[in-house]
Amino acid sequence: MILHGQQEEQTMIRKLAVFMLIIGLLFTSACTNRNNGQNVPPDSAGGSSPAMENTEEIKPQVNLAEIQANEVGKVMILMYHVIGAQKEADWVQTSENFQRDLKSLYEQGYSLLGLNDFIENHISVPAGRSPVIITFDDGSAGQFSYLTGENKEQEINPASAVGMLLDFAKSHPEFGHTATFFINDRPFGAKQDWREKMKKLVDLGFEIGNHTLTHPRLDKISDAEVQKELAGLAKLVAENVPLYQVKSLALPFGISPANPELAAKGNYEGYDYTNGAVLKVGANPALSPNRKGFDPYRLPRVQASTKELEKWLKYFSNNPGERYISDGDPLTVAVPKEKEELVSDESLGAKTLILW
Ligand SMILES: [Zn+2]
């Protein structure tokens, strides 16, 4: 009986060991999958980072003088509101004009950059091209809609901003398709699918930013109400898009809270929010994150009306030295010699500065 008891015990131990091994394997595999999930930016430079340790001279892949690389130049952050109107008006744009804007930007050497990549100074547009950031405020229906009709649900409306961006990038891959949607509660027409749409946007490679729950004037409400507005929207996104965090705030009406620090971080009922960037409403291109004086908490935007966009495209065409032109490598900062004094040592960090 004792022997039998020992055998039984040994069998139990063996079974337990196998069980632990299986649990261990499952756990390891779960962790690996997690790293492949949304918490890692899809285009992060992870693979290239060992080069940072290397102190040997880094030779640029392109002729910097030929492409006029200038990574202390200015960057347009475009601001759209309603898309798909019959006629252009203040804060309202037609689908045709939006398509025209994408074409003009592409033809004049711009490529889309995600706002999060901009604030993290990870600018990876192709060499010789200029980054441009597209933002949409207020989550209006024409920004992201599905077709209606039998078997059409979930088919993205090609006349919505999301549809047009995806379509244009198909034939112009070096332009890219990303944009940031600054939403309020129940965005995109408040139909039942707004929760699913948040997740879909992130899955498609777009970004979501904070535009508060109810779009109040933040200077007119209490500190507690400001935090309720910001934490509330951040929490809503996190609940609907697993592992995704909003990292930027577009101020409703461009107006700061009375206590401006609450735009960057705060807490409401145990929920913390942090914004690495705060965007204003007006009214000119932003400084490069490589440049002295860059302030991510006061980022200006260009209103993307026909008049304003044409004005700035013309400005950069007449003043090419003012424009950010990428060297194609997010780990190096290429700057004309005469602009060296503009480079921010703080932003440069471990990156290599290349003067030409
Ligand atoms: Zn707004």
Image (spheres, rainbow, N blue to C red):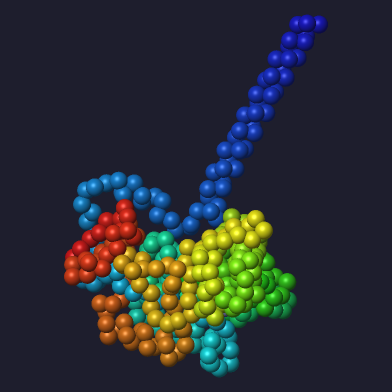
Q: Is residue 352 above or below residue 1?
A: below
Which residue is depicted at the point 53% across and 50% down? 36
Nearest the viewer among 99 and 141 is 141
**Picture quadrant where residue 192 is located:** bottom right
Which residue is depicted at the point 76% across and 6% down? 3
Position of residue 147 measured from the top left corner of the image (x, y, whole percent): 66, 78
Screen quadrant of the C terminus:
bottom left
**Picture quadrant where residue 16 is located:** top right
Screen quadrant of the N terminus:
top right
Position of residue 85 measured from the top left corner of the image (x, y, whole percent): 58, 89
Which residue is depicted at the point 60% across and 68% down? 223
Q: Is residue 96 above or below residue 321?
A: below
**Picture quadrant where residue 78 is located:** bottom left
* Identity of the residue furthest to the right in this view: 1
**Does residue 3 appear in this view?**
yes
Instruction: Judge left or right: residue 1 versus residue 240.
Output: right
**Does residue 144 appear in this view?**
no
Which residue is depicted at the point 41% across and 85% down? 309
Position of residue 234 measured from the top left corner of the image (x, y, whole percent): 60, 63
Nearest the viewer among 77 and 14 is 77
